Amino acid sequence: MHTSGDAALLAAWEAGRSQSPPARALSLLASTGVETATLANWPLGRRDSALLDLRAARFGPRITGLTHCPACGDRLELDFAVDDIRTACAGDDAEECIVETDEGRFRLALRPLRTADLLAVAAQPQEAALLARAVVRVDSDGEPHALATLPPAVVAAAASRLAALDPQADVRLALRCAACAHEWTAPFDVGAFLWEEVDAWARRLLVEVHLLASAYGWREADILALSAARRRAYLELVMA
């Protein structure tokens, strides 16, 4: 991977405007030079770790934002480092999960979920469909067992284990409201957050391109080839 240039990231933004969130994440990462098909088969944690790399490279090492307390509605400011939410990523291999119930001893081999899985089940009930894709093998007391007929307790245990298999894919923020002292955890979707930042950046960049093209008659490609500092310098001259 390399840091995406302005033209590549702008092209990713253009493509992402009509895409689903999982596909947008792939478009953003593809701007760094990695093939989309390769990215789609990375475990979600590895994908999200790469999104954090892209975010830090493009917008800096700190993340700021706003949320609201679910108890009192007071506004809460978020400010933390990208590295604060880095954690372990799953590998590509399947991991065994053993569940013992009154109905028998079940052994399942689970692999971490990938973006390709999210795209494949977009039109289906997600939890069951994703679990079906993640289960590589299942047997009961040494005999093969159909996933569709697993006891509910085994399905629940497998779903829980699947969530724990790839911690980087399930980042949660521990928050506390200063106004009412309420404490809660909130999921942090790095792909969605980065997309909002890229969307705002792209719209600002297009304004810069419009102003410079109008003033100097330059092509978009030539303007995007300029560094951000040089664009700002030219804009200051235009506005003077």
Image: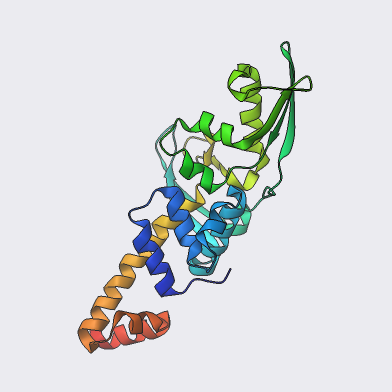
Q: Is residue 193 visible?
A: no
Residue with the most extreme front position: 144
Q: Position of residue 234 (x, y in %)?
A: 32, 87
Q: Is residue 191 above or below residue 164?
A: below
Closer to us: 102 or 59: 102
Q: Is residue 199 above or below residue 126?
A: below
Q: Is residue 162 above or below residue 37?
A: above
Q: Is residue 145 left or right of residue 128?
A: right
- Residue at 69% from the left image edge and 32% from the top image edge: 137
Residue 166, by quadrant, is top right
| Residue 115 in the image, given as x and y percentages of width and height | 52, 48
Task: In the displayed orientation, state which residue is furthest to the left.
Answer: 214
**Residue 10 in view (yes/no):** yes
Residue 172 located left or right of residue 19: right
Q: Residue furthest top?
A: 102
- Is 192 left or right of 131, judged from the image as shown? left
Image-based side of 110 in relation to 184, left or right: right
Which residue is depicted at the point 21% across and 86% down? Answer: 215
Q: Quadrant of the C terminus?
A: bottom left
Total numbered labels: 0
Q: Nearer the viewer, residue 27 or 147?
A: 147
Check the picture and name the quadrant holding the N terminus.
bottom right
Describe the colour scheme in one phrase: rainbow
Q: Return the x and y of residue 201 as percentages of the image width and height.
A: 37, 66
* Nearer the observer, 121 or 155: 121
Q: Residue at x 46, y 74 (%)?
A: 5
